[in-house]
Amino acid sequence: MTAVLEVEDLTVRFYAEEGVVTAVDGLSYRIEAGETFGVVGESGAGKSVAALSVLGLIDSPGRIEGGEVRFEGEDLLSMDESALRSVRGDGIGTVFQDARAALNPVYTVGEQIAETIEHHLEYAPSTARDRAIRLLDRVGIADAETRYSDYPHEFSGGMCQRAAIAMALSCDPELIVADEPTTALDVTVEARILDLLAELADEFDVAVQLVTHDLGVIAGTCDRAMVMYAGEAVETAPVEELYYDPKHPYTAGLMSAIPRVGDDDDRLPTIPGTMPDPIDPPPGCRFHPRCPFAEEACTRTDPALVDPETGEAATLDDDRAAACLEYTEGLSGGLDYSVEVAGGTGEHVEKAIDEREEGGSDE
Amino acid sequence: MSLRRFVVRRALSVVPVLFGVSVITFGLFHLTPGDPVSQLVALNPDVSAAEEARLRERWGLSGPVWRQYLAWLSNVLVGDFSRELRTGRAVSGILWRRLPETIVLGAFGWVFAIAIAIPAGIYAAVNKGRFGDVAARVLALSGVSIPNFWLGLLLILVFSLYLGLFPVLPPSRLPLYHPETLRYLLLPGVTIGTAAAASVTRVMRTSMAEELNEEYVTAARARGLPERTVVFKHVLRNSLVSVVTLAATLTAGIVAGSVVVESVFNWPGLGSEFVRAINRREVNVVMAITLVTAVAVVLANFLADVLYAVLDPRIRYD
Ligand code: SF4
């Protein structure tokens, strides 16, 4: 097992006028070569900030306060700008939420892909162009040769995202960071883009950090996933275990928020309450104001991320971790929830996981 | 729409603009009391009423305003800007002599403004909130607020009188292409360009700072492009769109400013001629200069529209 990315104890703060926001608080995770790793949470959980930190793209008033981001063993955070720039776009590709906004409107789509290739791979312009056209063709843009010279506004939303994936792959990266890549798209396009991403990740043997607020997306595409809440990881697990045996009450709550197949856009979490005020998070377990199992101890002690079986502090190598007092000191009431696999959400998840396994085996 | 049709359509739309401008100017001119004849008469009490009337008749100043206007218009339509009343010189001759002076001065002001403002705006936007940005903003605000006649006089005071670097007035008129001309051009050019430089700096800074927040900038950085490529290739072209809009408007400002600045520096262009013509009630000269100015402003707007489409592929000629 080689980790392509190891994030350790990453802390990112924003110095806003109203106060200091700790957007990411001591986050640790690892992504192995070729695997698709999901990062899931409600908006404001810090998952996008964490993704941008990997690339060192946090702008003032934000600041990466501590921790390490090791890409292929080297800490990106202690690199100088120019070394970091040679990793961005080359070793790590990025796919943004709004692909059209991520493309410069005044240059053609093709030019922008070729620009990256010329810059990192030092290709001659004509060779870079050829490579860009091949990539556009590979991501499913019909008539790529002509489309090369189209401007972003001449592309549909889905095509923009395809082009963005082509761009992310253009320099043969080891890792793609995809920040909510399908949120801006409608459901049918979303499914196709996710399939494409999964297919290409496999073909190019590239690891993917897939950031999303949608557990359904995670189920369909990821190998392992991390659930974030208020800047912290609350649970990490292989995807099947996350769905069938969630260890953290928040994960269990999120699952009940997954829309069923056929539901329109009803993605509002059904966990009552909202994310805590990021400037003044609640003491103890940050989830306690919304947690149906919260006890007195939860308001005092901040639960550490531990192996739920042993209760020992989780390390980067652990596949399974959760941050709930149940696994350290034990709650007097316990965690009394069960996952229904038969109906509703369970069916959806099962179906998504099954589909993926089928997709994986028919090669 | 093709570029050709666009040009033709725009060229045609100039006609009503010029017509409107000429009607308004002509009308306003006749609303102000006095004409060249009454001015002459005031200086010379011996002129009889009959002579006065004859003079008016000869200069075409008798009869209702609309008839005077139509007479002027019919001349202009066949390319004749009439004559200066007192001297009988052809107005077109005056235009041809004065126009290059103003174009050179205006162009110098423009180049000065752009050369200062674009780098200053970029610098301020990139260093937003830091010292250089604050300094640039304070300077830009002063530049916008200072009236150009005052700035002109101040520059003469400091650079000509105190420091003696420039002659207060050009000793004799040099041909425009003479290299010495540049020296005389410097103070009036800076005066006329300062306000434009200040506005362009402000707009450049604002639009650049806005563009820097766009997602494509983060995306370009995420692709590992060097910062200068991000700023000078990706952001600059987008932010220039709003500068072009402003530049078209500012051309009118520069033309208007030339009236004051040319008078302050005794620069023999259309602006100082305009002031002289107004004082002497030379209606034909005033009308001709107004028309030329209107054409210049329309032309500037037209160029801005073409530039838009060059800069931003989303903008079509329609
Ligand atoms: S520690 Fe307490 S409040 Fe936090 S998730 Fe566990 S039970 Fe809920």
Image (tube, coloured by chain):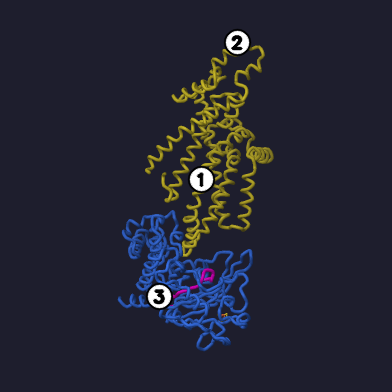
Residue position for label 3? A348
Residue at 47 percent of width and 61 percent of height: B220
Is disc 2 surrounded by few (<14), some (14 to 19) or many (20+) residues within 10 Å?
few
Real-space Cα distance between discs 3 and 2?
105 Å
Which amino acid, by three-letter code, is at mark 3? Answer: His
Residue position for label 1? B245
- Magenta range is A32-46
Q: Position of residue A47 (x, y in %)?
A: 51, 71
Which residue is more in the foreground, A331 or A170?
A331
Kindly report the secondary structure that dominates the magenta region of the rendered protein.
loop
Q: Colour of chain B?
A: yellow
Magenta stretch containing residue A38, yes or no?
yes
For the residues labelled 3 and 1, say whether their Cβ atoms are less than 8 Å apart: no
Look at the numbered disc 1 and give the secondary structure of its residue. helix
Q: Is mark 2 within 8 Å of ligand 1?
A: no
Real-space Cα distance between discs 3 and 1?
54 Å
Which amino acid, by three-letter code, is at mark 1? Answer: Thr
Magenta stretch containing residue B26, yes or no?
no
Q: Position of residue A188 (x, y in %)?
A: 38, 65
Real-space Cα distance between discs 1 and 2?
55 Å
Please tell me whether residue B55 is drawn above or below residue A133 in the rendered image. above
For the residues labelled 3 and 2, say whether their Cβ atoms are less than 8 Å apart: no
Q: Position of residue A25 (x, y in %)?
A: 57, 74
Residue B268: tell me if it is visible.
yes
Which amino acid, by three-letter code, is at mark 2? Answer: Ala
Residue position for label 2? B50
